Amino acid sequence: MNQRYLEETWMRLETALGDDTKRAQSHRISIRTVNTSRLTSFRLNSASFRSTKEPISVNQLKKIYKAKCDDIRIPVLPDQESRFITFCVNNFKNRHFHMKEAGLALQSAYVIGRVLKTSNFAYVDLSKNSLSCEGVFVLLKEISDSQTIVHLDLSNNEITPEGFDNIAKILSYHPSIISVDFSSYEGLHRNRLSNSGAMSLCQALTCNPLLQFIGLSGTGLSDGIEFIAQGITENYNLVSLDLSNNALNGKMMECLTKAVVKTELKILNLGFNKICDEGCEFISNMILGAYEAACPLINLNISHNGIASKGAGKIFHSLRLNILIKDFNISNNQFQQGLTTFFTTFFSDNCVMKSLNLSNCGIKSDHLQNVSDGLIKNTKLENLILSHNKIEDTGAQHIAFGLTKNTGLKSIDLSSCAIKGQGVLSIAKSLRNNFTLNSINLKDNSVKDDSGEIFVEITRLNKNFLSVNLDLNPVNLKFVESIKLNLKENRRLYKKMQIPKIREEIDRMRIPIETYENLNVKNRLRLEKKAEIERRHEIHDESFEEVKEKEQKKTQAMVQEHKILREKNVELALAIDATQSETIKTRVQNERKVEEMNLKLRITDIEIEKNGKKLNSTKEVNEAKKNTVNSALAEYRDKYQEQEMGRRALERTLTNLKSLLEEQKRQIETLKTCKTMANLRPSKSNRIPAEFLASEKLAMNKKKYSPKKKQKPLLKTQRSSSATK
């Protein structure tokens, strides 16, 4: 809870509801206090509001002590009673009522409620007691008509979901409470709201427009986050919401982030949950304004959520274009895979953020190679926390290079970063040219005497330095003492220089007062002239009345025109806001489309390369096949020519054989003719010589008993020639 917000809102609420005209003239009434017109008239005219509130008396303190003893079941002791009274008198100041860890229960709640009803306390702290649901209900019932109580702390009071319904009903119609803390921290008397409690709180948020600060840390709201999201969308005045340590996972972030953009929420605490990388996508969409409206947050805490490098990259990418978030805490997460390029672009592009917490995130020296460029370009970041990381000497050198030209950073925390002599020495040397940094924390490193000597010189010459922490470092004590003396002198000069600045601001505030006085003088002169004119025109009353009527009509017309112009101005402002949100949405969508198109182009390039490789391989295969086909054709052509030559030779032999056959036929015919002629001739003696018969017989026997020769197989060429035959 922000104390400054509470005090300012309470003063505005008091001016809107109170009868003190002097205070109402000295303080402006905010737009939020206008919503108090929804409250019923009986609360504004109640007796508790009209009556003057008296401070707490000794008798009332005695009653509180007695009720406390009854709750604890101990006797009332005079010595303890007197100490209790003196403690309360000394601590109940500035309208603060603090009874933390006092062992209060039901009896004490009743008595304290009666006391607060007749006093003017504004801030009530009853945390870490045992009031339970019955005690809290009795307390709220007693102060239900109080017009002074602004903040009520009921954390760790054994509140259960069963009895929270009655508490929420009283809160729904309370006329002054704007801040309630139902958180549950480590230890005894823990509060538990769960699903039914979230439903009751949703009704309180919708009915009471004054609630602006709600603390629900550690109350087990994981199942009832949908009711909380519904409640905050119907409360347009909510400023701060603490939902830390509620076991919220990534899927639950969708309904919550879509509800946040519909509110005027400025502070959101989601630390100690289980958002992980899955929920970072919804948070990044909320920050970018990808939902129905732009993100209204100024302070966002997502520490201790198991976020890795992928989720952090999405969030830093969305923070590049965000123009509202000034304080961002992403500490105690693990970026072991390194910081993406979006981190460096966030550093260079973001122009609003003032505080960034990256402590205990597993950041190594390799992750800070481009952080120097971001530190040079960023002029708005004032507080950077990098403690409990493994930055070492190389990372420290990158940071030192950025600090030499940085003109916006005022505080940097590098404690427990394993920085040794060379890294610290480079940081110390870089601070010689930096005149904007006024605080540096190098606790639990290896700062040595050479760096300590440079820090002594810097704190002596640079009067802007107000804080240097060198605890748990092996540096000589004399350097530490001299640094402390130099810083003490710098603080004294800083305070001395603040006085003329304040005076200048006061003089600037006086300038419009003088202009108002000059305008008042001119108005007085005009009124005097008007009085003279009225005296002159007393004779001509009729004409003066006509002129007066005309002037009144003109003024009415001007008033109407002024109203119309004001309505148009409001409409134009709304239209401008809508166009701005639309431009942000379109910008985000176009960036996403460009990224998608780039990815598609890369994929197509890869496919083209693959197809080219395939085409080249197929060309090579086809060329190899072509060569084989050509060689086969050449072989077939050679074989064909050989066969053709064989065929022609066979044809020639055939013709020769035909000619020989014809000749043999002719010879046979001639022989036949000769034989016939011989037959016609007279036959000689048919006796055959004995020699001839013996030789002929021998030849016939040889032919009969000789073995037959095997036929050789025909070749292809011979087969083809035989086929042609």
Image (cartoon, rainbow, N blue to C red):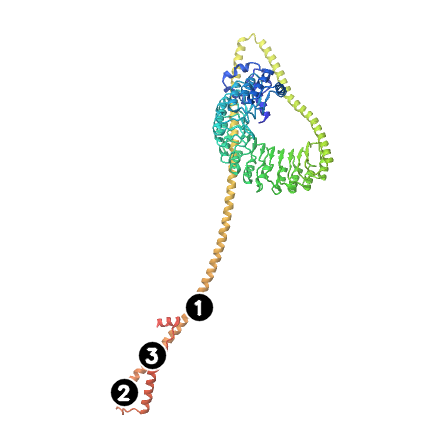
Which residue bears the numbered disc 1?
638
Helix, strand or loop for disc 3: helix
Where is residue 470, by image quadrant?
A: top right
Residue at 68%, 42% in the rendered image? 422
The image quadrant of residue 718 is: bottom left
Q: Nearer the viewer, mark 1 or mark 2?
A: 1
**Would you place residue 599 above or below residue 269 in this image?**
below
Residue 199 x %, y %: 47, 27
Earlier sequence position, callout 3 versus callout 1: 1
Q: Quick one: SS at disc 1?
A: helix
For the residue marked with disc 2, what is the amino acid? Answer: Met
Which residue carries the number 3 mark?
A: 661
| Quadrant where the N terminus is found in the figure | top right
Residue 324 in sight = no
Q: Position of residue 78 (x, y in %)?
A: 62, 18
548 or 18: which is nearer to us? 18
Quadrant where the C terminus lies?
A: bottom left
Amino acid type shown at disc 1: Asp
